[in-house]
Amino acid sequence: MGLNEEIRRRRTFAIISHPDAGKTTLTEKLLLFGGAIHVAGAVKSNKIRKTATSDFMEIERQRGISVATSVMGFEYEGIKINILDTPGHEDFAEDTYRTLTAVDSVIIVIDGAKGVETQTRKLMNVCRMRKTPVMVFVNKLDRPCRDPFDLLDEIESELQIRVRPLSFPVSSGPTFKGVYNIYDSSFTAFMSNDRQTVAETVKLALDSPELDTYIAPFTQKLHDDLALVEGVYEPFDRDRYLAGEVAPVFFGSAINNFGVQDLLETFIRIAPSPRPSTTQTRIVEPTEPKMTGFVFKIHANMDPNHRDRIAFLKICSGTFERNKNYLHVRSGKQMKFSSPNAFMAEKKSIVDVAYPGDIVGLHDTGNFKIGDTFTEGEQLKFTGIPSFSPELFRYIENADPQKFKQLAKGIDQLMDEGVAQLFTSRLNGRKIIGTVGALQFEVIQYRLEHEYNALCRYEPIQIYKACWIDSDNAEQLADFMKRKYTNMAVDKHGHDVFLADTSYALQLAQEKFPDIRFHFSSEF
Ligand code: G4P
């Protein structure tokens, strides 16, 4: 098979949701339909359980497990599918944001009883920024759910994207009858409650006289609903989906294997194959023969006997080969990898070749950073792998003066891994750690002690948000920096960051300094 054909048959995507909407269950069911696993429960959940908040050893153990489930590849009807898993726990949202930089599309899972929840909204902001095509799966129809039209309206307004239902449910909860697939005009009756294997379903056309026996007393309602769908929503336009403007919506019940196959079948037909990637200098087409790729995630090995890390490389163009020399652009060094990993279902194995859209796991002894580019010699730097505004801040201090060097090295490497972000205050040179979740502070402290033999302590600091700033008005920028000197810091790349104490202070700054741009991600 040639490079073009390999690209054409690849789909690399992530499933995102608010915790508990059913992401893990849907992932597992997709693997089940794909034949990658045979019974439910075979995939270790990447979910960090809520009870673990006070026990970060447990969290780290679970994160260790998640290396194996970070990428799940499988083949379905000749299509190579790569699902990039994202941590369920919202404290690890930054990991999810970064994973979204490596996918070509996204499936959003929404709980049909709860509708759009906070985490989904935040993750959708990242998708919107990147114009990532998204599909929506409204889950848990076996439970009493909200009215489908209300849900569709809420998705449109809360996620700021047009929707187009491609399936439509008949009732929900105890009277749930099934789902009508608008895309291929057939009704699938909800009958089985078999959660373990792929259930047989009955497919019927809308005009089938038999339909009534399955969906009475909702027959007329289905006809009315479908007429309303056709009246209200524009016909599905794949180009608009690919442009990230319209999200096709499916309904089902992941735990009951229901509606999942419709989703998968449609997904492989309409979801994009690997798309071009942007760099600081040019657009890289996946079909270019020379290999390029970037590191979007680094995972520390939780086994204390093996201190190495795994860097996840997304292949953007060409063919990646084992034992071939590649340029690590940032260091200028040639590197070759004798045992790169590929990820199939829940297993990882050594891979000889990989294609655009694939994710390769590289062993790293501390040399790689998020965003690092590999090429066959060209000086390229992929863009679109930003850091996002953290939400929680603390001063970090050395708690053992003998271990200054170890602490500095530890902080440096943990920041390269993307565990948190480091800012240095302009005022007093103190180091400030910014994270998206409280757990990271504990994780950092624990890992500094156990992996780097260094001790740190935290001190509170009142910051509402860190924003990267720039302006075309040099005078105003200088004035701002002078007035806000006590709130200014630099990030690890030396970029200016404004640390707003409160949302009011930020709003005031925006009003008073109209020529200054306040950015909520590091790439602008
Ligand atoms: P997440 O990864 O998005 O956090 O969600 P996950 O799949 O773990 O699902 C959260 C809970 O919702 C699980 O129940 C799961 O069984 C349930 N669930 C998922 N899909 C459906 C569905 O279609 N219908 C119904 N009724 N429930 C669904 P749990 O009790 O938290 O865990 P478990 O003990 O069942 O594993």
Image (cartoon, grey):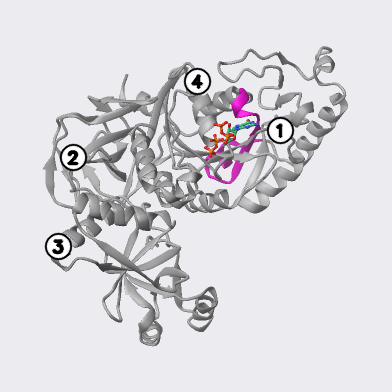
Is 195 on the left-hand or right-hand side of 24?
right
Which amino acid, by three-letter code, is at mark 2? Glu
Circle 2 — which element?
Answer: loop
Q: Can see residue 92? A: yes
Q: Earlier in the sequence, mark 1 or mark 2?
A: 1
Q: Can see residue 386? A: no
State the image quarter where residue 185 is shown: top right
Tags 1 and 2 in contact by the CB under 8 Å rule?
no
Could you tell me residue 438's position as x and y percent? 43, 58
In the displayed structure, 385 sits above or below 213; it is below
Residue at mark 1: C-beta within 8 A of ligand 1? yes
- Mark-to-mark CA distance, 1 and 2: 53 Å
The crowd level at tag 2 (other Cα within 10 Å; few <14, some 14-19, many 20+) is some
The residue sitting at 62% across, 37% down in the picture is 248
Q: Earlier in the sequence, mark 1 or mark 4?
A: 4
- Mark-to-mark CA distance, 3 and 1: 56 Å
- Mark 2 highlights which residue? 376
